[in-house]
Amino acid sequence: MLHQKCRQGLYPSSNIMRFAVLEEKVPWTVDYPEYKPVAYTAPVVKGKPWADLEINECTFKPKWNTVDDKVNRKSFTGDYVVNVDGYPLNPVGRTGVAGRGLLGRWGPNHAADPIVTRWKRDNVGIVIVNEHTRKPVLQFVAIQRRDSGEWAIPGGMVDLNEAISTTLMREFMEEALNFLEMNDADRKTLQDSIKEFFTKGDEVYKGYVDDPRNTDNAWMETVAKNFHDEENDVVGKLALKAGDDARNVRWMDINKEINLYANHSEFIKKTVLRRNAHW
Ligand code: RP5
Ligand code: MG
Ligand code: MG
């Protein structure tokens, strides 16, 4: 898959224009002597505890393609190349901008995406079947991102040393259930009610994300897992409330028209195929 969302127009939240890369010029193996992308690292990234230092900083000694002192610098795509100047190269190819942009890590930036689904039901609780495909309609918990305003899976970055299973449940609670604003007692009740549900996930995708923040030297990767509420009595019972980097949250009907952030629609399609739902 060649990336699309990270090789056009302005870099997000900046006035940096990406160098226009035609599809055939994306692979690094294609010679492109005229290619001169601007190097950009957003000011918000610099000096942050969750971010790397500059490549040429003498105290910065990353071990690429390994789990380097709790930072996972391994890519799901295999070993990536580090160029002669010491910069890791995006495994898919050119993006029209160098540097890290809005991403904290050089190389892969690992995230996790919880796809929480249920069947769409009518007001007496009967599962709705699409009249054309004769398949039941699936819904998933979607959030509207604060940064781009696009609807998305409520995913987030894997913290230092954090298990992916923890990230999946944590990000869901933060973005779709407003966990961060709850008191300790409510947090505990919530965690107890969904802990078991979040142990039963099906991995639907693992790999590179076509995220608009990707650059030539920094990119998103994710593990997307589907957690299905068959009887609508676990997450289906809870009141959704947007929190943290989410502006809105809702159960969204799934069909082939859905248009989501990055390549999240692709992960949703994989979930649909697995559940034999309407698309
Ligand atoms: C996407 O960015 C991932 O698929 C995940 O949904 C998200 C993680 O970044 P933040 O939501 O923390 O910005 O690439
Ligand atoms: Mg988050
Ligand atoms: Mg997020």
Image (tube, grey):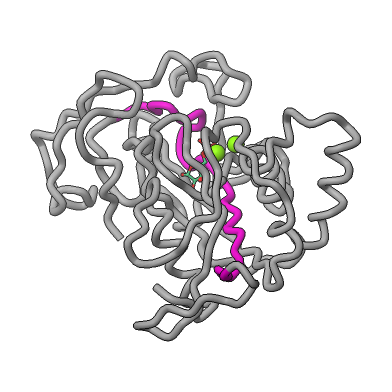
Count numbered badges in the picture: 0
Q: In this view, does 86 lie to the left or right of 168?
A: left
Question: Where residue 106 sits: x, y (%)?
Answer: 46, 33
**Residue under the image location 60 percent in, 37 percent down:** 242
**Residue under the image location 21 percent in, 52 percent down:** 29
Bounds of the magenta segment: 98-122
Q: Is residue 255 left or right of residue 71?
A: left
Question: Residue 70, relative to residue 266: is it above or below?
Answer: above
Was residue 112 drawn as part of the magenta stretch in this picture? Answer: yes
To which quarter of the image does residue 8 belong?
top left
As drawn, the residue found furthest toward the front would be 124
As drawn, the residue found furthest toward the bottom would be 134
Question: Residue 268, relative to residue 27: is it above or below?
Answer: below
Q: In this view, does 5 lie to the left or right of 197?
A: left
Q: Quadrant of the C terminus?
A: bottom left
Was residue 7 drawn as part of the magenta stretch in this picture? Answer: no
Query: Which residue occupies the foreground of this view, 106 or 150?
Result: 150
Question: Where residue 150 sits: x, y (%)?
Answer: 39, 41
Q: In which quarter of the image is the N terminus?
A: bottom left
Question: Where residue 72 sits: x, y (%)?
Answer: 60, 43
**Residue under the image location 48 percent in, 77 percent down:** 277
Query: Which residue occupies the foreground of this view, 134 or 162?
Result: 134
Dominant secondary-structure state across the stretch colored magenta: strand
As drawn, the residue found furthest toward the right would be 185
Question: Residue 45, relative to residue 218: is it above or below?
Answer: above
Query: Which residue occupies the foreground of this view, 139 or 72?
Result: 139
Question: Residue 179, relative to residue 166: is it above or below?
Answer: above
- Ligand 3: image quarter: top right
Query: Which residue occupies the foreground of this view, 76 or 255?
Result: 255
Question: Where residue 209 sits: x, y (%)?
Answer: 42, 50
